[in-house]
Image (tube, rainbow, N blue to C red):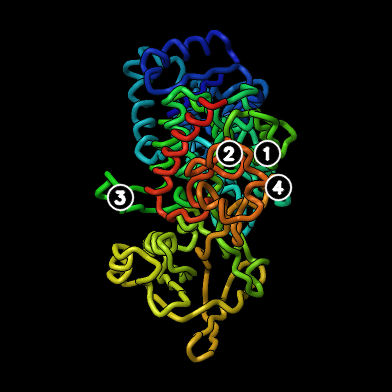
Amino acid sequence: MKPPIILAIDDDQAVLQSIQRDLRPQYRKSYKILATTSASEALETLVELKKQNEEVALFLSDQRMPEMLGVDFLMKARKIYPNAKTVLLTAYSDIEAAIRAINDVQLDYYLNKPWDPPTEKLYPVLDELLNDWQSSYRPPFEGLTLIGYQFSPHTHQLKDFLAGNLFPYQWLDIELNPEARNLVELHQIDSKDMPVVVLEDGTVLKQPTLQALGEKIGLKPKATQSLYDLAIIGAGPAGLAAAVYGGSEGLRTILIDKRAPGGQAGTSSRIENYLGFPTGLSGAELTRRAITQATRFGVEFLAPQEVVAIKPNGQYKHVQFSDGSEVVARSILLSTGVSYHQLDCPGLDRLTGAGVYYGAATTEAYAFKGKPVYVVGGGNSAGQGAMYLSRMASDVYILIRRPDLTATMSQYLIDQIDKTPNIHVLPCTSVVEGLGESHLECLIIQDLTTGESRKVPASALFIFIGTKPYTDWIQMNIIKDAKGFIETGRDLAKYPDYKDFWKLNRDPFLLETCSAGIFAAGDVRAGAMNRVASAVGEGAMAVSFVHKYLAET
């Protein structure tokens, strides 16, 4: 934490040195001591200090200065730091002005010069003022601050990106938070520049892209080498497990993700059926541990970086990125996972990011404290999202098309939902339409049994339906099933064009695609079980097949 500042101003250099000499031995352990002979320079410095999130505890100013009187300086300084304590240094002839200042500018104390000995005339006064300041002082948030409108798709995208990358940040709603308005005024930010990110050093990023923000917070979108033994595309549980095993077994491994590590599992508020964690753990915590483990083994992690194509060239595979750069790998693991299906209803597309969210329960839950929200979906992700939302929302309504949750959700989650009084399951019900101007305000929902529709107030709609594999970008000869999931191993033989692509004498390994040396693991693979543990197992297993393939080549 940055130490608060004591700022001393006196145009007489000899007096200023005397002030510094007395302040430093007494206060330098807890405060930063700054001093200047120029009041104008001090005011300019205060603005910069404010932008850098520095805090001033006390101003100690001489009264008679040629640029401006001490009282005038303290009035201006108080506008920048209204909670700082103020002390005026006066000669005997200035006492009347000091007394008037107590009433006019809420001066905290005036101190006659000289103040010898300081142990009797200076320290007791300053100690009392500083103790009083400390009693009400709340340290400012140290780090990145995001300012914007709650119902802005771009703002939601930035929040989701920061949360997904496990980066701590402070969110300030410009419409509700006075601190947000103060920062906007301080940095002279126009409303059309929203959302903005204010970095700890005072740098302002206006409407930043994910790539620009990622570089500023220390993420690496550029590879450091040109050739890798294993390139893993997608940093969900399968990709993370493969990275840990690949790195620990000496493979030059690079892990690439277009947004953030963790995949859908990374957004889960609580995973309670993962082996070895009897009290459960969040997806974010699992992701943090895995990334730490992989990087400790020398794995290089690129994010945000989007892969747009794979171009095999003999035993080498060229992985091409959206920014035009590329890396070459001897083997590839496709672990891009799945995304939620878009809910095709009038109004929802227009309101996505403005009250309608796909996943993102942990990112947006706090914004809907005390308000009714709806969840669409009957799988574990929907159940975990509903449980997390129930901590903040007044009521959580789960909409499912089936009569109950038993066929799609783990029993432990069903039991938790049954015991949570503000979660309500609405069976055989679907969303028909979303209503609202700038953000979601109401939903029209339909009872599928009776066909009856009704309008209900809804502050937010969180959608957790379906599993659409993220494979549309793959244009090379990789066999997929009718839904777009990647086929591997012996299942490839049922496709008539399999032999057109597979030219080796051996059969494909269990997780190998029809292109030798390119493997698939996790939810993106046809026939995979949609569980975190199975994805982790497949990621680890894929590395053993990578070793076998590399031994051949």
Q: Disc 4 and disc 2: Cα gap in Å?
A: 14 Å
Q: Which residue is mark 1?
A: 310
Q: Residues within 10 Å of mark 3 (few under 14, many from 20)?
A: some
Q: Disc 4 and disc 1: Cα gap in Å?
A: 8 Å
Query: Residue 303, relative to residue 295: is it above or below?
Result: below
Q: Which residue is mark 4?
A: 475
Q: Disc 2 and disc 3: Cα gap in Å?
A: 34 Å
Sequence-wise first label, 4 or 1: 1
Label number found at residue 280: 3
What's the amino acid at mark 4?
Gln
Label number found at residue 518: 2
Q: Disc 1 and disc 2: Cα gap in Å?
A: 10 Å
What's the amino acid at mark 1?
Ile
Element type at mark 1: strand
Element type at mark 2: strand
Q: Residue furthest left?
A: 278
- Discs 1, 2 touching: Cβ within 8 Å: yes
Comparing 444 with 22, the one in front is: 444
Query: Residue 394, relative to residue 228: is it above or below?
Result: below
Q: Disc 1 and disc 3: Cα gap in Å?
A: 38 Å
